[in-house]
Amino acid sequence: MVQNAPTQMVAGNIFESLLKYDHDLDPIPNLATDWEVNEDGTVYTFNLKEGVKWHDGENFTAEDVIFSMDEMLRETNPRLRVNLEHVEKMEALDDYTVRFTLKQPFGPFLGLFEVGTVPMWPAHIYQGTNYQETADDNPPIGTGPFKFEEWDRGTYIHLVRNDDYHVEGQPYLDEIYWHVIPDAASRAVAYENGEIDILPGGSIENFDVPRLAEMDNTCMTTKGWEYFAPLAWMWLNNREAPLDDKRVRQAIMYAIDKEFAQEVVWNDQGRVATGPVNSVTRFYTDDVKDYSYDPDKAKELLEEAGYDGEEIRLLPLPYGETWQRWAEAVQQNLEEVGINVDMEATDVGGWNQRLNEWDYDMAFTYLYQYGDPALGVTRNYISDNIAKGSPWNNVAGYKNERVDELAEKGAVAFPDEKRAEIYKEMQQILVEDVPVAWLLELEFPTIYRCDVKNLVTTAIGVNDGFADAWLDR
């Protein structure tokens, strides 16, 4: 129910979904052993693995799949809710067979079943309850390789081996401690001192990566982010002046030195974004309006729009010093062209609340793309996904009927060449309208002891749990 990246990293050891994905984004069996698709791509039938047990000993069945997807996740997961609109009917044909009937072909349907998007929930615990209250009153119960043991708030989360895990002999590790270390510098020191073995992507400042990567018995990989393809931007509140004027939003794009951010703030990691679709995501195009750094163009647009120095509040992302430095660099860029920026720092909880309630003017964020525009891109720009209570939907309040139409057509068009045409037009409109200020395609290196084997084995890396990991010690 909480979609923040650090939460998903821990939860991927406890919960599972029907499928996993390799580094080419091809589906791999998990809680589903195999699946069939009818000729016109409207009926998907999954055969579930038998003998899978929840951590409390109850059997995992088709009833749990239907409850998770057709009831609980429709209510609690705004990203999935949009994609489930393509599903006409979900049926449990028997205890281990589930059939999904779609309203029309939906190209990325088999790409939905990543554990952070479609985690399986135990119907015998949650059905008929207030989900939030039940979750607050109970430890998390999943089918994953590790069980929740203890959460010492502010110190660690302790997971222990699931002795009844459905893959024979796995997991190989007896326990995992996820240490809660509030600042990135202390995390780096903890790794240097041998207190921890793994630094997940994004857990230390970028300027520390080269130094730590040179340590003995240290390996580094950027694999494990192919499915997510994280894209960083600033939300721009399209509802309020002066950001309700497209010319002001375009001026912001011209005013920000994105190349400086990529080279200096992010130590040459990642790539400058050209629009709403990451260049590693399907149907990306670079045939869009160019917003290379041009302060003079920014000033011209601000003058044309009649901007007269109104204060604009900027909310940094409270994920460490790199993000704070980036916010300061952007503030300086904007002030250099005459935009009056007030920085309003907050913690993660406050950041969530401010975005949930649309209480911001500009706000840093990064979101995942999930391999396909229909899964992780259009959710941020379609008008029927404007709703308070989530920092991951159309937080900007952007409305464009043509974009809505293209997003709907792109999800169901056939073949892929037609989808590519549709998404190209959609990207061109969005980049012209600038509903948000796209900044960088992020890369998050995972740093770990070289004697930790098989740590990253899928397209979501450490988020997929440590079932395959073992220690060569």
Image: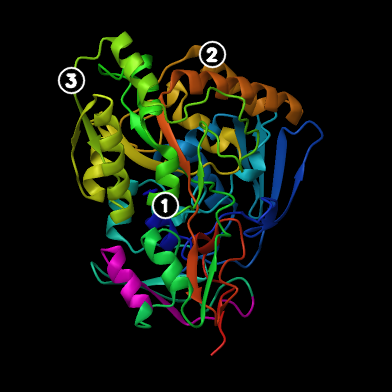
| Of pointers 3 and 1, the one earlier in the residue sequence | 1
Q: Position of residue 199 (x, y in %)?
A: 42, 68
Labels 2, 3: front one? 3
Q: Nearer the viewer, residue 13 or 75?
A: 13
Tally of marks: 3
Label 1: element kind: loop
| Of pointers 1 and 2, the one earlier in the residue sequence | 1
- Mark 1 sits on what residue? 266
Q: The disc labelled 1 sits on which kind of residue?
A: Trp
Q: The disc labelled 3 sits on which kind of residue?
A: Glu
Q: Position of residue 166 (x, y in %)?
A: 60, 70
Q: The disc labelled 2 sits on which kind of residue?
A: Arg
Spatial separation of the CA atoms under disc 1 and disc 2? 35 Å
Residue closest to the far right: 39
- Mark 2 sits on what residue? 402
Residue at screen point 33% across, 76% down? 190
| Of pointers 2 and 3, the one earlier in the residue sequence | 3
Spatial separation of the CA atoms under disc 2 and disc 3? 31 Å
Query: Circle 3: is it few (<14), some (14-19), or many (20+) Cα within 10 Å?
Result: few
Q: Which mark is residue 13?
A: none
